Amino acid sequence: MRIDVHAHLFSTAYVDGLRAVFGKDNSPAGQDAQRLIKWMSTDPRMTNLDGRLEEMDKWGITMQVLSVPFHGALVQDKPAALDLTQMANDMILRAARAYPDRFRIFLTLPLQFPDAAVQELDRFAGRSEVVGVALMGSAGARPLNDPEFLPVYAELERRGLPFLLHPISPPGLDCMLELNLANVVGFMFETTLAAVRLVYAGVFERHPRLQMIFPHLGGLAPYLMGRLQWGYERFPACNENLSAPPEAYFKRFYYDTVCRNVPALRMALSMFGAEHVVFGTDIPFREDIGLQLQDLETLGLNDTEQQYIAAGNASRLLGIPLELLSSL
């Protein structure tokens, strides 16, 4: 029994929508978007729902929580951003409604337009398929700790909706357009920078019940924890919004297992505990699911720890009853 909290699905219509917005954009962000659009257009795993179900069965994945890495977060034109938002959310909702025993969803939000983001939450209020939201590493070229975004975090906390922090367009992208460096390196910088901003800015201090899933095993954050502590001790800007050291907030997060490095997995488990690690695959952008599972096996975890990571933590965090999964 496994719940995969980090999985994506697209449609040809959504990819066409991205192409209409970014197809002639020669900025670094536009060029990188075009690279990903080409990938999404040529790999059938990106859009094939039946193939996804077969892949899940192959790897013993009982349920996936679908999300969309949302290029609409980069869009400054409000109607265009809202069109992409609705297209993305309606598409993954259709999958979850068609297979309610196999899929749940993280909503995409146009965070750069906070009023529209809350309206999108309202549009899906009460839907059992929705178990959280996905936020990108920035929104409309603004950092996630922008004061205008704070009401959205308050709404997420009030509604009990965790968010998956997902990369989409790393800072310094102009230096990463070759060698697929955005995917390999830049995305880890993006989510780490966003998470640290949110912590130091006191967003999780103000909203103690707000929950976050930090993908790719927390990016660079675990390795930088000592430096984050030093910044907290040395610079007033890094402590004036906090009542505890930064590590205390990072220990509240959940970290998915998309990593492919056993020592790094051990480090994350030692820092955050098995109770805060959740299973993820990054399907369809990753094809190495067997190797990811092999790494988890190599850890030699006890039965309780394995159950926490495979499904128990996600069940608790996202409100997905384990009884539902065991009946499948």
Image (cartoon, rainbow, N blue to C red):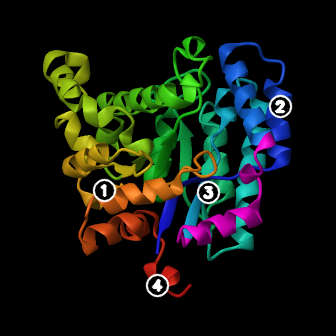
Q: Which of 39 and 116 is in front in this view?
A: 39
Query: Can you identify the residue that label 1 sits on?
Result: 276
Percent across and percent down for residue 126 are 61, 67
In the rendered view, would you say 147 is above or below 205? above
Q: Quadrant of residue 28?
A: top right
Q: Quadrant of residue 277?
A: bottom left
Magenta-tinted stretch: 42-62
Query: Magenta region, mostly helix, strand or loop?
Result: helix
Is residue 79 visible in the rendered image? The answer is no
Q: In this view, does 167 lie to the left or right of 235?
A: right
Identity of the residue furthest to the bottom in this view: 327
- How crowded pointer 1 is (Cα within 10 Å; few <14, some 14-19, many 20+) is rated as many
Query: Can you identify the residue that label 4 sits on?
Result: 323
Query: Can you identify the residue that label 2 sits on?
Result: 19
Query: Can you identify the residue that label 3 sits on?
Result: 66
The residue tagged with tag 2: helix, strand or loop?
Answer: helix
- Amino acid type, residue under disc 3 in the picture: Leu
